[in-house]
Image (spheres, helix red, strand yellow):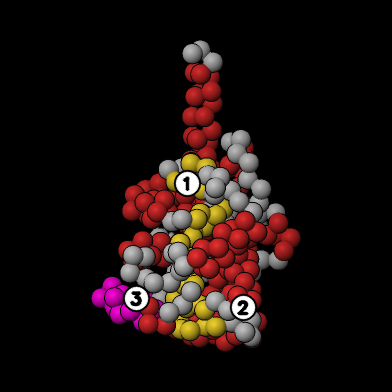
């Protein structure tokens, strides 16, 4: 499987169809895999958080969720076929689950949001087997009981809808105990499905402006992540570009 090593992590520059094929094969074979997406905010956080960086590297599949990361990798000379927005991937996996009779457990978000999400997913995917759900506002001492509850439900798939780095650190800590075959960190997917948040129009998604739409919806929560975070990511990218140029120039004298 093709892999890019950059920003201290591994990234798999695959098409969505390739990921879906890997996921289906893994579930059918009974193996256990985890998947996360990376965007500019992820990169900013993992640079200063070694535990988070390790959790990303320990995931079996890492897709590119942010258009800024796609552009950065392409400018650095890497072949990146497409951006894979996590909500689109999550929907495709649920279509697959409905067809293949896979079961799923939903973990994350506020209680009213996860309940609305469960209802809306049932309407959108009538044959989908949702075997359980749990809000994401639990205390550390409750984690073991939640893991037991997930295992008791015996889901094939676990969606974790919490913010980073909380979701990555959670399945890094418990992936050896969780018996589910496939785990995907879905971020704000539950908020979108529940109707609590709207997703950006397609034209904004295609132009890499989904962040702006999110900022308009949640300015108090998102201003720091985007207005400051984008500049931080740009600085990291420029340093990476300069470093790569220096390596190329030095190799010319060898």
Give the residue displayed 49% in from the left and 24% down from the top: 247
Give the residue displayed 41% in from the left and 76% down from the top: 136
Work out how far the residue at label 2 is from the one at label 1, CA to CA, in angstroms.
31 Å
Crowding at dot 3, Cα within 10 Å, few <14 / some 14-19 / many 20+, comes out as some
Work out how far the residue at label 3 is from the one at label 2, CA to CA, in angstroms.
24 Å
Q: How many numbered discs sit on the rendered protein?
A: 3
Q: Identify the mark at residue 129; answer none if there is no mark.
A: none
User: Is residue 61 one of those drawn in magenta?
Assistant: no
Q: Secondary structure at mark 1?
A: strand
Q: Residue furthest right?
A: 203
Region in magenta: 137-150
Compare residues 64 and 201 and report the one nearer the observer: 64
* Residue 242 place in picture, x, y as percent: 52, 29
Tell me which numbered mark, 2 or 1, is placed earlier along the sequence.
1
Compare residues 30 and 128 and report the one nearer the observer: 30
Crowding at dot 2, Cα within 10 Å, few <14 / some 14-19 / many 20+, comes out as some
What secondary structure predominates along the stretch shown in magenta? helix
Position of residue 229 in the picture relative to residue 170 (left or right): right
Q: Secondary structure at mark 2?
A: helix
Query: Up-down: is 24 above or below 74?
Result: below
* Residue 61 place in picture, x, y as percent: 50, 55
Work out how far the residue at label 3 is from the one at label 1, CA to CA, in angstroms.
27 Å
Residue 68 visible from this viewpoint? no
Q: Identify the mark at residue 147; answer none if there is no mark.
A: 3
Q: Identify the mark at residue 10; answer none if there is no mark.
A: 1
CB atoms at circles 2 and 1 under 8 Å apart?
Answer: no
Instruction: Identify the residue under disc 2.
Output: 98
Q: Residue furthest front?
A: 29
Say which of marks 3 and 2 sits in front. Answer: 2
């Amino acid at each position: 499987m093709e892999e890019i090593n950059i920003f201290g992590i591994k990234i798999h520059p695959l098409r969505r169809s390739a990921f879906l094929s890997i996921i289906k094969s893994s579930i059918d074979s009974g193996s256990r895999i985890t998947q996360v997406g990376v965007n500019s905010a992820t990169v900013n956080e993992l640079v200063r958080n070694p535990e988070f960086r390790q959790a990303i590297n320990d995931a079996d599949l890492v897709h590119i969720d942010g258009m800024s990361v796609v552009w950065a990798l392409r400018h650095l000379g890497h072949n990146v076929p497409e951006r894979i927005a996590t909500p689109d991937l999550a929907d495709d996996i649920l279509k697959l689950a409905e067809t293949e009779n896979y079961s799923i457990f939903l973990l994350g978000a506020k209680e009213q949001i996860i309940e609305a999400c469960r209802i809306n997913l049932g309407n959108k995917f009538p044959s989908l087997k949702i075997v359980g759900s749990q809000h994401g506002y639990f205390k550390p001492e409750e984690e073991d009981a939640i893991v037991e509850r997930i295992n008791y439900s015996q889901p094939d798939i676990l969606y974790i809808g919490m913010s980073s780095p909380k979701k990555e650190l959670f399945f890094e800590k418990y992936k050896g105990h969780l018996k589910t075959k496939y785990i995907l960190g879905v971020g704000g997917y539950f908020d979108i499905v529940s109707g609590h948040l709207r997703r950006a129009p397609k034209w904004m998604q295609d132009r890499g402006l989904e962040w702006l739409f999110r900022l308009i919806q949640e300015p108090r929560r998102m201003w720091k992540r985007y207005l400051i975070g984008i500049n931080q990511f740009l600085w990291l990218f420029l340093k990476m570009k300069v470093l790569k140029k220096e390596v190329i120039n030095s190799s010319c004298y060898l």
